[in-house]
Image (cartoon, grey):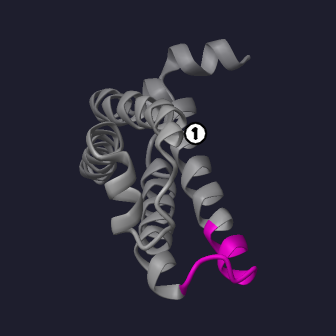
Amino acid sequence: MPFLRPVAYVIGLSQILLAILYFAVPAGFVAWQGLTPPAADAGYPLAMLAARFLVYGIGMFHIARDPAGNLFWARGMVAIQVIDLLAGAAYLAAGLITPATAALPMVNAALFALALHWALGQVRPTTAVRERAA
């Protein structure tokens, strides 16, 4: 379990940073990533995305404090990272993004998913969690 806490904090910080960037400079951040700058009204769904980054980022700090009691949410972040990786692979395969654009987010998604999955393998559910599952 000691490995899970730093992994959760790193992932949480990254999610909060993404939230700040998508809230503060959505079009600029998208363009900085090498993507087509979005229309001004696309800021609205990007703000909704930022809200989810923020909440899950804060949630990762909660997970770090009580990993055994938050296995569902921690596994949810693994799923998010795997979906992010698959989406990147699909857009890359379709030629819609370049390897340079895809590299950092796809490597991060793979590392976060693997590290969190491995760390979760060391966590045993609490008695209360096992009783709810029964």
Q: Is residue 77 visible?
A: yes
Question: Which residue occupies the foreground of this view, 70 or 38?
Answer: 38
Label 1: which secondary element: helix
Q: Residue at x 54, y 55 (%)?
A: 81
Q: Residue at x 44, y 33 (%)?
A: 47
Q: Position of residue 23 (x, y in %)?
A: 32, 36
The single residue placed furthest to the front in the displayed view is 40
User: With respect to residue 62, does 76 lie above or below?
Assistant: below
Residue at which label 1 appears: 76
- Image position, residue 16 (x, y; %): 29, 40
- For the point 32% across and 26% down, which residue is it? 62
Picture layout, residue 5 above or below residue 81: above
Residue 97 drawn in magenta: yes
Q: Is residue 79 left or right of residue 126?
A: right
Query: Where's residue 106, x and y in %?
Result: 50, 71
Frontmost residue, 60 versus 35: 35
Q: Which residues are magenta?
A: 88-98
